[in-house]
Image (tube, grey):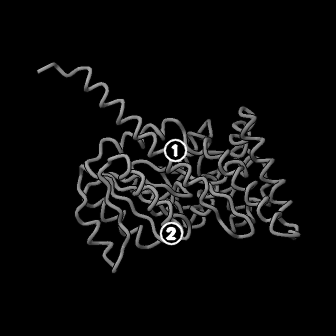
């Protein structure tokens, strides 16, 4: 039952503190409160701008459940919790503009397109919004940590199935092109487990998966974690099945146009990771050359 989860004595004072508290307590929440927690983590702009009725409809719960969720984290009610996200938006005008543009875009897409050019324009606009939002969901610190993980790894394993396959295959190919020892787990002939079983504590597994999450990717992450490898996850939720065991989660929100979800932001992120590693590797070699003594 929801009441079995004890309330925090002191409510988080910022949206970032609340996010950390949710991640820490997520597994102890009831399924209903987990639904709300995921929405709070994945849709902070909506939490700031929408009414309780709209949020409850999108979460698939009653408004009273959202109030109970807020009280679980120490707030008198839902409005006090929402105010944290609203304050965050007001302190960053770009974020507020993004939320408003998404609203207008969704209203425009509801109309029937007149031809192929209209459809193209819709996808271009949707992907543009997703790319603009990428810099807000993936921080500079996240990128630095991800690049460091790749750089320090003895071997980088990459896995991603179904819709995530293009992103994973691009990552594996590109990392090999910049001379990083990389193994692509493609699962050919049902050999996913066999391909993962050579991973070790000095390696990194980059796992890519979006809802609904591929079972093969989840199994690969669980195997890699059990063998002591570090997990770098690229996913659409901070509480997805591949996010929980990860040392780092890069949160990507792709555009969805007429029920078709894009991969533009994910490919952009993959490119940035590879180029970031290439620059870091080059700098490291330069430092080594300067400190080396002549023979």
Q: 10 Å neighbourhood of mark 1: few (<14), some, or many (≥20)? A: few
Q: 10 Å neighbourhood of mark 2: few (<14), some, or many (≥20)? A: many
Could you tell me which quadrant the C terminus lies in?
top left
User: Picture coordinates of residue 244 (x, y %)?
Assistant: 43, 57
The Cα–Cα distance between marks 2 and 1, rounded to whole angstroms, is 23 Å
Residue closest to the eye, 1 or 20: 20
User: Picture coordinates of residue 53 (x, y %)?
Assistant: 80, 60
Q: Residue 69, located in which quarter of the rendered image? A: bottom right
Left or right of 58, for residue 191: left
Left or right of 2, for residue 189: left
Left or right of 226, for residue 39: right
Q: Where 20 sits versus 222, above or below?
A: above
Q: Tags 2 and 1 in contact by the CB under 8 Å rule?
A: no
User: Picture coordinates of residue 72 (x, y %)?
Assistant: 59, 52
User: Picture coordinates of residue 99 (x, y %)?
Assistant: 76, 47
Q: Residue 233, located in which quarter of the rendered image? A: bottom left
Mark 2 sits on what residue?
213
Q: Secondary structure at mark 2?
A: loop
> At x 37% / y 62%, what residue is drawn?
221
Residue closest to the eye, 249 or 270: 270
Q: Secondary structure at mark 1?
A: helix
Camera-side mark, 2 or 1:
2
- Extreme residue toward the front, this view: 295
Q: Where 122 sits versus 249, above or below?
A: below
Could you tell me which quadrant the N terminus lies in?
bottom right
Query: How many labels, in total?
Result: 2
> At x 44% / y 37%, what residue is drawn?
144
Mark 2 or mark 1: which comes first in sequence? 1
Q: Where 144 sits versus 7, above or below?
A: above
Mark 1 sits on what residue?
20
- Extreme residue toward the bottom, this view: 189
């Amino acid at each position: 039952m929801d009441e079995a989860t004890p309330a925090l004595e002191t409510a988080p004072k910022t949206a970032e503190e609340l996010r950390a508290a949710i991640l820490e307590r997520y597994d102890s929440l009831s399924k209903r409160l987990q639904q709300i927690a995921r929405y709070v983590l994945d849709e902070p702009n909506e939490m700031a701008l929408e009414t309780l009725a709209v949020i409850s409809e999108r979460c698939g719960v009653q408004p009273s459940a959202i109030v109970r969720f807020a009280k679980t984290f120490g707030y008198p009610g839902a409005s006090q919790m929402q105010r944290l996200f609203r304050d965050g938006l007001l302190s960053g005008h770009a974020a507020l503009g993004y939320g408003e543009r998404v609203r207008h875009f969704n209203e425009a897409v509801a109309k029937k397109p007149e031809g192929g050019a209209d459809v193209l324009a819709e996808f271009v606009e949707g992907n543009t919004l997703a790319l603009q939002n990428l810099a807000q969901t993936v921080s500079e610190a996240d990128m630095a940590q991800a690049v460091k993980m790749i750089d320090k790894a003895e071997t980088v394993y990459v896995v991603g199935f179904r819709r995530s396959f293009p992103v994973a295959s691009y990552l594996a190919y590109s990392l090999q092109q910049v001379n990083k020892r990389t193994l692509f787990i493609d699962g050919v002939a049902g050999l996913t487990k066999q391909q993962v079983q050579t991973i070790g504590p000095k390696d990194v597994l980059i796992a890519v998966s979006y809802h609904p999450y591929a079972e093969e990717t989840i199994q690969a992450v669980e195997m890699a974690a059990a063998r002591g490898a570090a997990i770098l996850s690229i996913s659409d939720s901070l509480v997805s099945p591949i996010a929980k065991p990860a040392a780092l989660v890069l949160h990507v929100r792709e555009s969805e146009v007429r029920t078709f979800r894009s991969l533009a932001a994910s490919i952009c992120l993959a490119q940035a990771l590879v180029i970031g590693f290439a620059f870091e590797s080059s700098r490291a070699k330069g430092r080594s050359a300067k400190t080396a003594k002549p023979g």
